[in-house]
Amino acid sequence: MTIRNWVKFFFNALLIGGVVTAVVGLIVRWEFFSGYLQAGEYGQFILAFVWMVFLGFTMSVVAQMGFFAYLTVHQFGVNMFKTLTLWNWVQLLIIAIVLFDLIFFRFRLTSEDTERSLLYLALLVTLVVVAGVTAYLKAQWTKKHTLISALFFMIVITTLEWLPALMVRSGNIDSWVTILLFPLLAVNAYQILALPKYNRMSDVDKAQLDERRAARKKATAASSK
């Protein structure tokens, strides 16, 4: 990918993270935001909203770091297991382990707190559904064998990026766990679906650059005669 296209890719992902976090944060924490509106503290409302946007920028950067780390892990996995088929089975096993860990260890679902349990089950369904839709689109738009890899990225890597929030056990953590999942999913879905487009644009840019270089060399050679 060329620098110009990488910058576009980066800032588009940054914008998605900021917008999604701000919107979801406004919905999930409306009681907090509405307090400023009711008190007429519009400046504080705007500052809190802007803070949400910058939180989204941070989550976008985390997601982008995770994405490029995954590209390395994916290539390493293919090389280690020799065939893509075997690596896909390994990825499916890891997906199952991660989902098991979420349900039984990270979420800590109990029958005593039904409301919290329903919230986390809804978040799990959201994670799996968005991952499934993204993987399906990836396979349709590129090659069928990318389905498992896209599913692995959307579930396993997103969960790893989400893990710091899941490990906190104090404060209004359920709201933050909810808020932070959505920018990670949105940015990761954008990255894995949009990357081929930016790679194609980079190939075109490189071809045009080569043509300009060849034309300059030809012009220089002609003028030197």
Image (cartoon, helix red, strand yellow):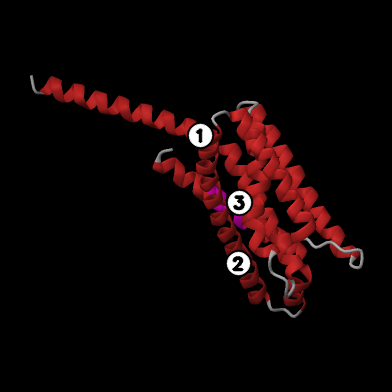
Q: Which residues are magenta?
A: 12-19
In the rendered image, residue 16 lying in the magenta stretch gets the answer yes
In which image quadrant can residue 27 be found? bottom right
| Residue 48 left/right relative to 209 | right
Q: x, y (%) of residue 26?
A: 72, 64
**Which disc number belongs to residue 50?**
2
Residue at numbered disc 1: 79
Kindly state the secondary structure of the residue where label 2 is placed: helix
Q: Amino acid at mark 2?
A: Val
Corner quadrant of residue 176: bottom right
Neighbor class of circle 2 (other Cα within 10 Å; few <14, some 14-19, many 20+) is some
Q: Which residue is mark 3?
A: 16
Looking at the image, which residue is at 60% across and 64% down? 55
Q: Is residue 30 magenta?
A: no
Q: CA distance from mark 3 to mark 2?
A: 14 Å
Closer to the camera in the image, 6 or 113: 113
Q: Secondary structure at mark 3?
A: helix
- Residue at 70% across / 33% down in the picture? 136
Marks 3 and 1: which is nearer the front?
Answer: 1
Verify CB contact (< 8 Å) between mark 3 and mark 2: no
Cβ–Cβ under 8 Å for marks 2 and 1: no
Q: Position of residue 169 (x, y in %)?
A: 73, 71
Q: Nearer the viewer, residue 69 or 100?
A: 100
